[in-house]
Image: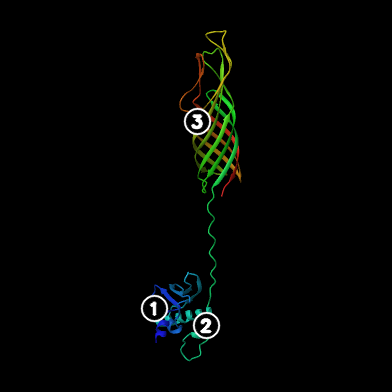
Amino acid sequence: MWGLLIGIWLSHPLVVVDGEGTCPAPSDVEARLGALIPQVEEREPQHRAVLEHSAAGLQVDLRRDDGERLAQRVLDARGSCADLAAATAVVIAAWEARLNPEIAARMKLPGGDKPAPVPKPELTAVPPLPPPPPPPHVGIEGGIGVLASMAGSDIAPGLTLQGVLMSPGDRFGATMALSGSGRRDQVLDNANGATAGWMRGVVALGPDVRLHGSSQLVFDLHVDALLGLLRVEGASGTSGTDPLATWSSQSDISAQVGAGAGVRVMRAWGSLGVWIGLGARAWPGHQRLAVEGEPQATGEVPRYDGELALGVSWRRHP
């Protein structure tokens, strides 16, 4: 007696039936299925049958606990709910007997002690899920170009190196550029024609917005924070107050901060591109040129400059 009670307590139905319809009701199918297949031990895996009505009829799915589909069939939904519940239970029992031959020997079929032949279930192969898409990649660009730097009335040639990181959608990014131009000579006031030469190297960093045009054209709009390194060299000259006195050349280096903005147009051919850029820069404050001991000999480095550049780029995009 106690052994029977313990066996009942440690057993469960082999198949649990779920569904939202009422004809047949999942509970009716599960009751008829319980009359065909005895309960199994608790350690044996439990399957789940899902009933779903569609235009084609009653769709029956048999699944594992983890949701993996084992079999599927669509039954004709015509007839009484009782007949449909009985037919559904027989189909599920046939699937279980096919999946586990031991179930066939334990099935309680009406009409004699000998079990009826088990119909071959229609097992549907479920294709594996497609692999997840690869994670988005950041676009990388690197370029080199020649430039013409314009400050006041002077134009000096130079070079620029540029690097760009673009978002996976190739719409937004960040730009970093290194550039430098050649020496410019500036005549000092009240210095008997003496001159001072200066040159500036610049590091630029800032956001970039990209607009896509036709024929592989892209337009980059950028604003930059600037860090400049200004080098000034004075030439030898003669004192304006004492013609017999002279001064020798000296040099000085100072750092500057500034702001800039520009536009770049690029035509791409695969991973290579040719571009032209136009930019403007502003350097707050005053960079005055003075001669020690000659207060009347003065000058000033221009606070604004422009840049026209032409170059090539290598691109790696997702």
| Towards the viewer: 8 or 52 | 8
Q: Quadrant of the N terminus?
A: bottom left
| Towards the viewer: 315 or 34 | 34
Measure the C-alpha gap from mark 3 to mark 1.
79 Å
Q: Secondary structure at mark 2?
A: helix
- For the view shown, which residue lies furthest in the left direction? 22
Measured from the top left, where is residue 286 in percent x and y? 47, 24
Q: Which amino acid lies under the numbered mark 3 shown in the image of this protein?
A: Arg
Which residue is found at the position 54% from the left and 41% from the top? 164
Q: Earlier in the sequence, mark 1 or mark 2?
A: 1
Q: Which amino acid lies under the numbered mark 2 shown in the image of this protein?
A: Glu
Q: Quadrant of residue 142?
A: top right
Left or right of 35? Residue 202 is right
> In the rendering, which numbered label is found on residue 281?
3
Residue wearing tag 2 = 102
Q: Earlier in the sequence, mark 3 or mark 2?
A: 2
Q: Is residue 79 visible?
A: no
Measure the C-alpha gap from mark 3 to mark 2.
85 Å
For the residues bearing labels 1 and 2, Cβ distance under 8 angstroms:
no
Q: Secondary structure at mark 3?
A: strand
Q: Secondary structure at mark 1?
A: helix
For the residues bearing labels 3 and 1, Cβ distance under 8 angstroms:
no
Left or right of 164? Residue 36 is left
Measured from the top left, where is residue 269 in percent x and y? 61, 44
